[in-house]
Amino acid sequence: MNVEELIITVTKQMDGYTFSLSPKMRKKLLQAYSEAVPRNSLFVAFDVKEDFEQMLGSVLEHTIPILTGLEKEKFKEIKYVDVSTGDKLHQITSANVA
């Protein structure tokens, strides 16, 4: 069993963003991948995000291994969803997964 679609929820706060995996998503990852180490959430402050992106590119792609313990290539589709509106903020598909 593979998890083809990874959904990461995003919460904008006063001083940064919190990227999270739902309990259901964490459970799916653990069932599908023995090497998965899913975490509840990751907070990135606005100033850290800006500095990081100047040096290393998009923070988004780096949230995947931190939150899941897996490389992004494990997933066909990765969606970042606003937790309060349900709107899709960003999407990475297998076509643009390097």
Image (tube, rainbow, N blue to C red):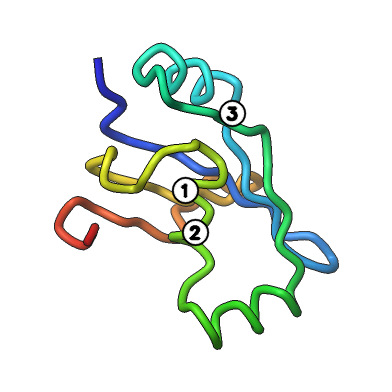
Q: Which residue is mark 2?
A: 62
Cβ atoms at labels 3 and 2 below 8 Å apart: no
Picture residue at 31% right of the left edge, 26% below the top:
3
Q: Position of residue 31 (x, y in %)?
A: 41, 12
| Kind of residue sitting beneath label 3 | Ser
Q: Check the image and name the residue furthest to the right.
A: 14
Q: Is residue 91 above or below residue 76?
A: below
Give residue 22's mark.
Answer: 3
- How many numbered discs sit on the rendered protein? 3
Quick one: 69 or 77, which is closer to the camera?
A: 69
Q: Quadrant of residue 47?
A: bottom right
Q: Position of residue 94 (x, y in %)?
A: 19, 51
Cα distance in 3D space between marks 3 and 2:
18 Å
Cα distance in 3D space between marks 1 and 2:
5 Å
Residue density around tag 3, few if under 14, some if 14–19, many if 20 or more, within 10 Å = some
Q: Which residue is mark 1?
A: 64
Residue density around tag 2, few if under 14, some if 14–19, many if 20 or more, within 10 Å = few
Cβ atoms at labels 1 and 2 below 8 Å apart: yes
